Image: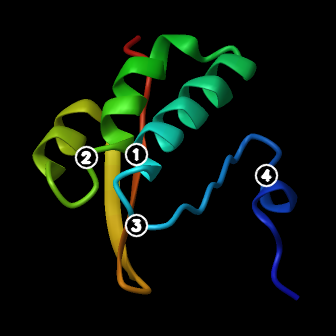
Amino acid sequence: MARTATQASPRLVALVLPGIPGSVPVARRHVRDALGLHGLGEFAQDAAIITCEQGRGLQIVAALSAHWGWRHEDGGKAVFAVLAREV
């Protein structure tokens, strides 16, 4: 049986939105809110930028993240990025 995102990890946040321009501000707001909820607000700005750059600015994603990648999805692609604190 497939696990949902919250079953896989309580810290994993997943959101599926249609590939329309109106989804961009919804995704950015969701990411900022989720990071704030988990006490990770320091990553909110970079994460919001990464969220809205799928397919248009992968160089920005690479520059802002410690690790990133992508995979084909129905009708497009899904991009993931890992942000990390500098120590």
Whole-number angstrom distance, CA of label 2 to CA of label 1: 9 Å
> Of discs 4 and 2, which sits in the foreground?
2
Q: Amino acid at mark 4?
A: Ser
Q: Amino acid at mark 1?
A: Val
Work out whether mark 2 precedes mark 1 in sequence or the reverse, and give the earlier one.
1
Tell me where residue 71 appears, x and y as whole percent: 36, 75
Residue 24: name its quadrant. top left
**Callout 3: 10 Å neighbours few (<14), some, many (20+)?**
few
> Of discs 1 and 4, which sits in the foreground?
1
* Residue bearing the label numbered 1: 24
Q: Amino acid at mark 2?
A: Glu
Secondary structure, mark 4, is loop
* Residue bearing the label numbered 3: 19
Tell me where residue 58 appears, x and y as whole percent: 17, 52
- Where 69 falls versus 58 (above or below)? below
- Where 71 falls versus 36 (above or below)? below
Work out whether mark 1 precedes mark 3 in sequence or the reverse, and give the earlier one.
3
Whole-number angstrom distance, CA of label 1 to CA of label 4: 25 Å
Work out whether mark 4 precedes mark 2 in sequence or the reverse, and give the earlier one.
4
Mark linked to residue 9: 4
Residue 85: name its quadrant. top left
Whole-number angstrom distance, CA of label 3 to CA of label 2: 13 Å
Q: Residue at x 38, y 62 (%)?
A: 20
Work out whether mark 4 precedes mark 3 in sequence or the reverse, and give the earlier one.
4
Visible in this render: residue 66?
A: no
* Residue bearing the label numbered 2: 53
Secondary structure, mark 2, is loop
